[in-house]
Amino acid sequence: MLLANYEYYITTYGGSSIPSPSFPKKVMEASSKVNYYTFNRINDEILQDEIVGNTIHNITCQISDLLFEQENLKLKIVNDENKEVASESLGPRSISYVNQSNLKEKHILSEEELEQKIYKIIYQALVHTGLMYRGAY
């Protein structure tokens, strides 16, 4: 079950970073994460609740943005062959270069860090709704 659509992403959430063709894949990944951490408890009835439903839509959009951003950063590093001058000496002409991708790597999250960030987003929004309760009802 997809927990957000592109119209909601653009109009209500105010997203702009994910283009329309890329949105279905990212929202599917994000919906999967939200469903996983809520033990597949999200249904149409919950989504129709104005407060909880909008919260679920918003965190799905937020996670979609995060996943799209991380994927783009990884692609830029793979495709980036540009180098920047890190230092330059005038004496016996010495130039040191730094690959821009090294600078961008600082913004890429490891798989564990990404998963922790996704969990934190979901936890902060849904912890008091009972959707993340691990016990039996």
Image: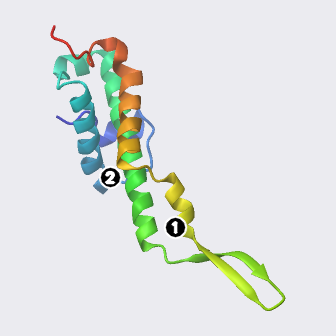
Vertical position of residue 99 compared to residue 33: above or below: below
Viewer-side residue, 135 vs 132: 135
Please tell me in which quadrant of the rendered image residue 120 appears. top left
Q: Is residue 58 visible?
A: no
Vertical position of residue 18 compared to residue 3: above or below: below
Of all residues, the one furthest to the top in this rendering is: 137
Question: Which residue: 31% across, 42% down?
Answer: 6
Of all residues, the one furthest to the bottom in this rendering is: 92
Tag 2: residue type?
Ser
Of all residues, the one furthest to the front in this rendering is: 92
Question: Which residue: 27% across, 19% down?
Answer: 132
Q: Position of residue 118 (x, y in %)?
A: 37, 36
| Label 2 packing within 10 angstroms: few (<14), some (14-19), many (20+) | few
Viewer-side residue, 94 vs 72: 94
Question: Which residue: 22% across, 37% down?
Answer: 32
75 vs 45, left or right, is right
Question: Which residue: 32% across, 30% down?
Answer: 57
Tell me the distance, in whole angstroms, between the alpha carbons under discs 1 and 2: 27 Å
Please tell me in which quadrant of the rendered image residue 112 appears. top left
Question: Disc number at residue 8?
Answer: none
**Quadrant showing the C terminus:** top left
Residue ID for mark 1? 101
Residue ID for mark 2? 20
Badge 1 marks a residue whose secondary structure is: helix
Q: Is residue 5 visible?
A: yes
Earlier along the polypeptide chain: callout 1 or callout 2?
A: 2
Tag 1: residue type?
Ser
Please tell me in which quadrant of the rendered image residue 93 appears. bottom right
